[in-house]
Image (cartoon, coloured by chain):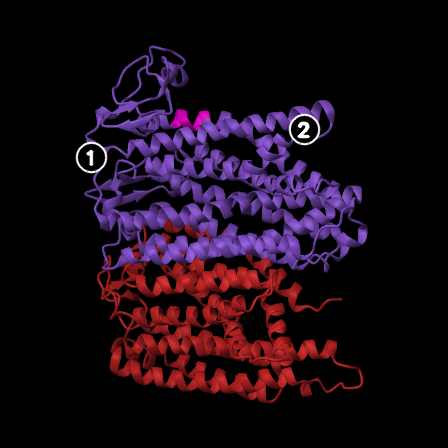
Chain colours: A red, B purple
């Protein structure tokens, strides 16, 4: 494997990590928006805040990491994407500011406006990130600076559908993860006389939403396949030929996640839901490889070899520090307070 | 230098969002060290005042870091959204420090999560240790980001042929001639901003009558940090200016408003640069030649050596430079006053003028730091990469890009107002007792 392909794999793994980790944080914000009012809603919001509080900043860094690796290793791809898609990127920027700042403010000072900003931004950000992904995947971002249409590149069936799919997938991931968190919280706070924690209203609340959003995500994925057939033939061809196994795997894992949630096997359901989303991300990547942008394959897009080698070394050294730190963070806060 | 309107909006947007983020970035570098120091002293002495200080500072750090993380993300978007030409052309040369910075930022965010949320979950010692990576990673991430800016001032480590980069040595690009003076100058500025801004909060409270042990300690620790950094910064600033004199003579000429090349160049303080001459300035004869060459016969290059189109906006650069140096020496004097009284009399100066000076020192430190960035960024114009790529050639030509500026200005104005309001509310929601007890520190919730 060439250094460029290796780094492309690292970038794609980071995209996957961002989708599975930060995606769930956005999803929690979406459920925050839909939680309603009253004491039950307050408790559910508190649970979501408790779960994402320690981890959301680290999860957010995956996005920055993807951007810096992209501009270091594939500068023409980064400049083409960011210049053509500057409008949705600006909207993502506003979503990032609104979500992060409002979340931090809400923790410090209770105020309804912060809650609303946090929740709305959590919906807006994945939508426009998805729309950008749809624009790239449907070959609407040509190589060159601002070479694509400033509006048409992301206001089209593929982009809008991918945006909706991203929102739905985030909500699905969050609901599946949170059902497990609610179950665990109920185990610890439930009265000893009532050991059947699945009867806890929060567990049921998240479980129903996991099932509903799972069905919606599956339907949007199918619709996406049909839309790409008409709107993005190259992607459709890749998805139905080279990447067909991943498409099938995504569908199978999604179904498995639904069954596992229904069967109250929450830990296994998390893995299956994550796999379903990861398979979509990799299905897209494999379907289009080695084309990064239309007419620009990997070997025409990568930076000079010296840069790639230095970056590969830096990434390898960085991962040695990063992986245990990340494992420590996630383990520490998935474990319950003594 | 004449600018098209299409150029001004992206420059202003980048300058504004960078200038805004830098204040938070400075606190992100300096505040963790201050928090850890207070926590460590609290552990060693058992003094609840130290421990309460550490917890309250950590709570503010949590909010500031989150806002800094998102405002920093915006900058990475803007690198492509606004400066696509720069990234397209030189992305492979200056990408590596950003990739390393990405890891440093990761470590920072991970351990900040552990540190803030682990206060009551980890043993005191482990908790203190969990804070150390935040300090180290904060310094490293600031260092690597600034190396990329240093490279724009002193582009090295690559070969260009027919307008295309054909060979690159990314490590040489990171460790270029500007790297050490610029990063050191910036890190010290971050420490000064943290120290003086934090101290000014306590000075304001003390002026309002809260003259208790908690406020005195908060002021002493923070001002101590600023006072230690100020004299070092004077020496490092001189080093940075020497680098500029050697490598970017036109920037130095703009800083001093010097038009003609020659020996016995004056050091000019104040004045307004208008129509190729500096008016109304105070001149120290041969001062500039002496400072740069230690010799009055030393020749200093003037602005006249390059065509007008290749000169930066001199009036702005000169004013910003004088502002930075003036405020820097003011902060040095304040730190010396504080240090002198602390050393001789083991207390704070008693006059209210001291507290008034500390109260404005935070703003002064921020203005000095921003002025320094104006010197280095505006002073480099019309180049984005000194001598190689003009800013006007690097900008994204997509239609409507200029609309980003008003949107961003509105959002950041709102963000500033809300951030200040939230920080003020945080200090009042759980008021500090006049004499904090063990339980006050133990029960104070960080998150």
Residue A77 coordinates in the image, percent (x, y): 30, 59
Q: Residue at x 56, y 59 (%)?
A: A323
Confirm whether the magenta stretch covers residue B430. no
Please name whichever residue, A336 or A110, is drawn nearer the observer in this view of the structure. A110
Q: Is residue A3 visible?
A: no
- Please say if B437 is above or below B378: below
Q: Is residue A145 left or right of residue B327?
A: left
Whole-percent x, y for residue A200 in the image? 68, 85
Specify the subunit that label 1 lies on.
B
Q: Which quadrant does the C terminus of chain B fall into?
A: bottom right
**Counting residues from the N terminus, which is met first, the one under dot 2 or under dot 1?**
1
Residue at position x 72%, y 50% from top? B432
Give the dominant element type of the magenta stretch: helix, strand or loop: helix
Residue A56 % position (x, y): 54, 63
Q: Is residue A68 above or below residue B250?
A: below
Q: Residue at x 32, y 74 (%)?
A: A159
Front one among B129 and B65: B65
- Magenta part of the chain: B238-243
Marks 2 and 1 in Cβ contact (< 8 Å): no
Which of the labelled discs sits on residue B349, or is there none? 2
Tell me, yes or no, whether dots 2 and 1 are on the same chain: yes
Task: Identify residue for label 1.
Answer: B309
Distance, label 2 to label 1, CA atoms, is 52 Å
Q: Is residue B150 left or right of residue B328?
A: left
Q: Name the mark on residue B170.
A: none
Q: Quadrant of residue B204?
A: top right
Res A197 → quadrant: bottom right
Q: Position of residue B304 (x, y in %)?
A: 22, 24
Above or below: residue B66 compared with residue A208: above
For numbered disc 1, what is the local secondary structure?
Answer: helix
């Amino acid at each position: 494997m060439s250094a460029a392909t290796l780094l492309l794999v690292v970038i794609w793994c980071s995209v996957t990590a961002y989708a599975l980790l930060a995606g769930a944080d956005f999803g929690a914000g979406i459920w925050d928006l839909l939680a309603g009012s009253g004491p039950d809603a307050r408790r559910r919001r508190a649970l979501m805040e408790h779960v994402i509080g320690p981890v959301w900043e680290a999860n957010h860094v995956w996005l920055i990491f993807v951007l810096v690796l992209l501009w270091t290793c594939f500068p023409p791809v980064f400049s083409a994407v960011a210049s053509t898609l500057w409008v949705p990127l600006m909207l993502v920027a506003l979503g990032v500011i609104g979500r992060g700042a409002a979340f931090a403010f809400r923790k410090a000072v209770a105020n309804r406006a912060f809650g609303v900003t946090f929740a709305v931004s959590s919906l807006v950000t994945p939508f426009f990130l998805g729309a950008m992904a749809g624009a790239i995947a449907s070959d609407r971002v040509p190589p060159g600076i601002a070479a694509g249409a400033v509006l048409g590149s992301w206001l089209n069936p593929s982009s809008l559908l991918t945006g909706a799919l991203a929102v739905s997938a985030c909500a699905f991931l969050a609901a599946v993860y949170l059902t497990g968190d609610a179950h665990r919280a109920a185990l610890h706070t439930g009265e000893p006389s009532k050991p059947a924690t699945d009867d806890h209203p929060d567990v049921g609340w998240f479980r129903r939403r996991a099932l509903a959003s799972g069905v919606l995500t599956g339907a949007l994925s199918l619709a996406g396949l049909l839309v790409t057939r008409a709107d993005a033939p190259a992607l459709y061809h890749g998805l139905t030929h080279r990447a067909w196994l991943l498409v099938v795997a995504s569908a199978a894992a999604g179904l498995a996640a639904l069954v596992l949630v229904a069967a109250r096997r929450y830990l296994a359901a998390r893995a299956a839901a994550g796999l379903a989303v990861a398979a979509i991300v990799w299905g897209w990547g494999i379907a289009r490889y080695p084309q990064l942008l239309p007419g620009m394959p990997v070997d025409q897009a990568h930076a000079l070899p010296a840069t790639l080698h230095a970056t590969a070394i830096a990434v390898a050294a960085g991962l040695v520090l990063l992986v245990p730190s990340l494992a420590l963070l996630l383990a520490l806060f998935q474990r319950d307070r003594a | 230098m004449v600018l098209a309107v299409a150029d001004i909006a992206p420059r202003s947007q980048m300058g504004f969002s960078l200038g805004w983020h830098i204040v938070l970035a400075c606190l992100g570098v300096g505040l963790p060290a201050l928090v850890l120091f207070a926590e460590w002293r609290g552990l060693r002495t058992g003094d609840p005042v130290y421990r309460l200080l550490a917890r309250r500072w950590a709570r503010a750090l949590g909010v500031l870091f989150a806002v800094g993380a998102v405002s920093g993300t915006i900058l990475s978007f803007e690198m492509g959204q606004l400066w696509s030409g720069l990234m397209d052309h030189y992305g492979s040369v200056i990408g590596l420090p950003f990739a390393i910075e990405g890891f440093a930022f990761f470590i920072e965010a991970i351990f900040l999560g552990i540190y803030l949320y682990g206060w009551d979950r980890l043993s005191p010692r482990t908790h203190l240790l969990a804070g150390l990576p935040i300090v180290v990673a904060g310094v490293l991430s600031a260092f690597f980001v600034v190396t990329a800016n240093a490279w724009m001032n002193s582009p090295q480590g690559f070969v260009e042929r027919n307008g295309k980069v054909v060979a690159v040595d990314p490590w040489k690009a990171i460790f270029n001639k500007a790297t050490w003076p610029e990063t050191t100058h910036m890190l010290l500025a971050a420490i000064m901003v943290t120290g003086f801004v934090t101290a000014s909060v306590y000075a304001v409270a003390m002026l309002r009558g809260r003259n208790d042990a908690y406020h005195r300690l908060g002021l002493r620790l923070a001002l101590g940090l600023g006072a230690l950094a100020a004299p070092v910064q004077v020496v490092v600033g001189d080093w940075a200016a020497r680098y500029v004199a050697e490598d970017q003579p036109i920037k130095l000429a703009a800083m001093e408003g010097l038009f003609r090349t020659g020996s016995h160049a004056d050091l000019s303080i104040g004045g307004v640069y208008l129509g190729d001459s500096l008016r109304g300035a105070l001149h120290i004869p041969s001062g500039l030649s002496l400072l740069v060459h230690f010799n009055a016969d030393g020749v200093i290059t003037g602005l006249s050596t390059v065509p007008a189109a290749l000169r930066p906006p001199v009036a702005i650069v000169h004013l910003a430079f004088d502002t930075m140096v003036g405020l820097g020496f003011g902060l040095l004097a304040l730190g010396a006053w504080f240090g002198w009284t602390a050393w001789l009399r083991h207390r704070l100066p008693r006059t209210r003028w001291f507290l008034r000076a500390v109260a404005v020192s935070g703003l002064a430190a921020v203005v000095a730091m921003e002025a320094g960035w104006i010197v280095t960024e505006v002073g480099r114009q019309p180049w984005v990469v000194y001598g190689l790529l003009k800013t006007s050639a690097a900008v994204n030509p997509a239609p409507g890009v200029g609309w980003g500026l008003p949107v961003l200005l509105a959002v950041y104005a709102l963000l500033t107002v809300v951030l200040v309001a939230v920080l003020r509310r945080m200090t009042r929601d759980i008021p500090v007792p006049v004499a904090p007890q063990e339980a006050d520190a133990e029960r104070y919730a960080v998150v």
